[in-house]
Amino acid sequence: VSSRSAGKAAAFAALHGIPQSFGSFREMANDGDFDIMYVGTLHQFHREHAQGALEAGKNVLVEKPFTTTLDDALALTELAEKKGLFITEGLWTRYFPAVEHALHMVRGGSLGEVKQVEADFCFNAADGDAGVLLDKELAGGANFYVSIYSLGYTTAVFGTEPEKILATGHVMEGVDLNNVVVLQYAEAKTGIAISGMQVESAEEVRISGTRGRITIHTPSHCATSATFCLKLEGRGNVEYEHKKNYSKASNVRVTNPQRVVSVPS
């Protein structure tokens, strides 16, 4: 582990049983005893620290947001490719079993053709360190802190670039307090992402297809449960509804036992 202070790094390492600590990220990057470096510093330093790690020959996991500008993101990915190194954004959400299962069903066609994704993630900055979260100079705001989660679901489900993006929000002193983004895709597909730092929302995700829908339950950024609903023709005519908890035994409710279909476990 590294810090701006060697003393703080040593104290953190001792507390968590980490064998090595360093007084700067460059000192850490130049150490040859590990293969991958995690960059979890403040947003505006991500490019500098990730680039230093790549230049030192390290693979890199960068905490979200990957960078604060497109140019910085492209510079890092191009450098990693040039040096034959791995770099990615630390968006853990996609690796939770509940989310992996939901995406498996989407890609396997269980929902039919998916047409709509709705995701929200809002929390009240006043519940934490609002000074950092809302500081323009520290790249604060809803977009950098939470939009990545709600937008991430849309991109994961549709897997392509949107044809059109519509966005609105409220900005105070150069920092966005909240935002709503609508992404329009080919074949009449739509993603709706809501993010904010003023109130605490339900934080759920709804993925809707022509054959059924999935609800990923709160907290969707680290989901442990989801409900899978497959339907028959006709509004509200449910064929199968399955709520699965990925940390406990699952609950299954079958609305029409004569028409149960197979859902991956």
Image (spheres, grey):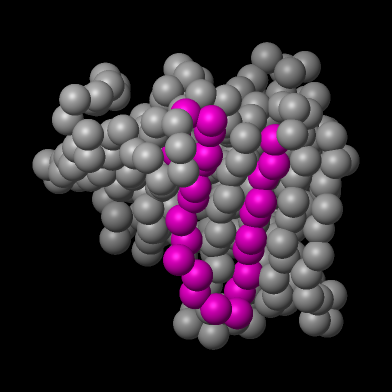
Is the residue 107 above or below the residue 227 in the image?
above
Q: Nearer the viewer, residue 225 or 65?
A: 225
Residue 92 visible from this viewpoint: no
Q: Quadrant of the C terminus?
A: top left
Label the magenta part by its dominant secondary structure.
strand
The residue depicted at 84 percent of the width and 34 percent of the height is 163
Q: Quadrant of residue 259?
A: top left
Q: Quadrant of residue 195?
A: bottom right
- For this view, does 222 lie left or right of residue 248? right
**Residue 3 in the image: x percent, y percent?**
54, 58
Residue 212 is inside the magenta segment: yes
- Looking at the image, how many numbered discs can be counted on the residues? 0
Q: Farthest residue to the left: give it.
A: 249
- For this view, does 60 lie left or right of residue 233? right
- For this view, does 263 lie left or right of residue 47? left
The residue depicted at 53 percent of the width and 33 percent of the height is 209
Stretch of the chain drawn in magenta: 189-213
The residue depicted at 61 percent of the width and 23 percent of the height is 86
Q: Quadrant of residue 136?
A: bottom right
Is the residue 44 above or below the residue 228 in the image?
below
Residue 147 visible from this viewpoint: yes
**Residue 36 in the image: x percent, y percent?**
51, 30
Q: Farthest residue to the bottom: give it.
A: 126
**Residue 64 in the image: x percent, y percent?**
61, 49
Residue 182 is inside the magenta segment: no
Q: Nearer the viewer, residue 63 or 114?
A: 114
Q: Nearer the viewer, residue 253 or 105?
A: 253
**Residue 161 in the image: x percent, y percent?**
77, 31
